[in-house]
Image (cartoon, grey):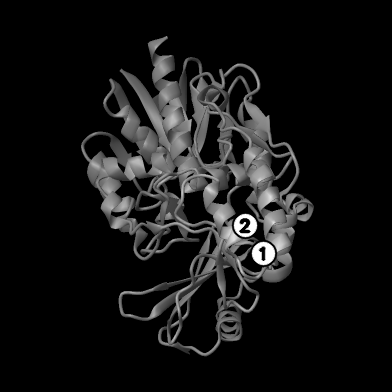
Amino acid sequence: MKRVAIIGGGVAGISSAVELIPHDLRITIFESDSFLGGRVAGGEGWDTGRHLVTTAHKEFLGLLETIGSKPTISLRPATIGTITRLRKPFWRLSIPLAGSVSPLAGLLGSTFLSFPQRFGAVGNLAATLNATPAPISDEDMMGDGKNSNFVEVVGETFESFMDQNDWVRLLRSRFGYPLVRSICNLDAEQAAVEPVLRAIKLILDDPVKLAGWTTGNVGKLVSEPAERYLDGKIDLKLNTSVLSIERDNSSWKVEANGRVDEFDLILLTIPPGNISTLSSSNNHFNYFKSVAEGISAKKIITTRASWKGFESLPGPILEPESPYVVWFAESGVDGNVVVDQVFSGVENGDMNSPAQLRKAYDQRVKKLFGHAERVSDIIVRPYASATPSIAPGVQRPRVRQGEGLYYAGDWLHTGLPPTLESAAIAGNMAAKAILEDCKN
């Protein structure tokens, strides 16, 4: 019986474990936190930046179906739109129609454009959607573990793309930044356009076209159901930090909490920069470890409070003057509105004072969103690191790395931005690669 170590109990790790359980394998998950779920759980019922879930995200919804928590997401008709700099009117780019018809109809019905502008924008948008690159194939994502274990992100940035297309320029000049930028908390100056367009097209081509947000106590969405599902089926090691992974002859040695265990296969679902010692004869880790260390100086910070007399927002709102600040506002259980300000990819030296963050948050909410009365204390939560970017030129790994080493996570070559769906896809692909290799 092959011994498989899954390092990291986030969405990718859970997805792969669920797929591997029916097969003749001994599976162990190592998770440094006291709960499963990774960033989608966030700890103490927090999410470090709300995640969009749509009916187009079939891999992630399939995972929720398996562990029994899919009904806990409230899915409503999906819209992709934008909001003015004054945060008043909301214009829908997408209406509940199938495929490219949806945003085209949304543009034709918009009143902020003249008739010639509407038809010109429709033509540009149609050409853009038709030119959206094809999804990445399973084979390309998994690789062969021998050659080209990393893929370079190519193409222009989303910022450049926005500047070249009239329909985006018109929206931007009138409304600021389109909401599509905020779906994945992306910095348009860095993000490559192809993954973003794939993500948008994925939603637009979905015939059901429903969407919801992982909000509130999201531990109940993934963490608790996953633990119940995996109980007794695998060896689950929570509160266990992996210090080193080393290749020794024909097996892998994993050191965690003062103990060393041997495994035949390793699935690493966290960026290698998070582990102190990584070594093997093929030097798999050296390149990507340096990439991961480049983002280890950045973190995510969420500031949150409940407000009275505040209307919920139609989706995430990106600050025009700050590419890494996103606002969320959603009705809470007490009838008030929970307002999150999420800083994504902040340098560790920035904004280290919780008191300063609370003061700035209080002032900013009142300035941006008008009259409202705060009814709870302001809470600040940092998350240790951000996800590696999808900027052009960045190397993203394939699943197979050779010698029984596999990667999975939203930082993989999935062709999509780092989202719950890309994490679930990578986890399922890793399980598929492991099963294929075990047969050979």
Q: Quarter of the image containing the N terminus?
A: top left
Marks 2 and 1 in Cβ contact (< 8 Å): yes
Q: Estimate the x, y position of residue 179 in percent, counting from the top left.
A: 59, 61
Say left or right for 431 vs 131: left
Amino acid identity at mark 1: Tyr
Q: Estimate the x, y position of residue 437 in percent, counting from the top left.
A: 44, 15
Q: Which residue sits furthest top?
A: 440
Q: Estimate the x, y position of residue 74 in percent, counting from the top left.
A: 33, 59
Residue drawn 51% across and 36% down? 244
Q: Nearer the viewer, residue 280 or 405?
A: 405
Q: Quadrant of residue 440?
A: top left
Amino acid identity at mark 2: Arg
Q: Name the disc covering residue 126, or none.
A: none
Q: Name the disc covering residue 177, or none.
A: 1
The answer to whether residue 188 is seen in the rendering is no
Say left or right for 420 vs 22: right
Q: Is residue 412 above or below residue 92?
A: above
Q: Which residue sits furthest front?
A: 115
Q: Nearer the viewer, residue 201 or 280?
A: 201
Q: Quadrant of residue 297?
A: bottom right
Q: Estimate the x, y position of residue 94 in percent, counting from the top left.
A: 52, 56
Q: Is residue 182 above or below residue 247?
A: below
Label 2 CA crowd tier, 10 Å (few <14, some 14–19, many 20+): many
Label 1 CA crowd tier, 10 Å (few <14, some 14–19, many 20+): many
**Element type at mark 1:** loop
Q: Name the disc covering residue 181, or none.
A: 2
Q: Nearer the viewer, residue 293 or 216?
A: 216
Q: Nearer the viewer, residue 44 or 222?
A: 222
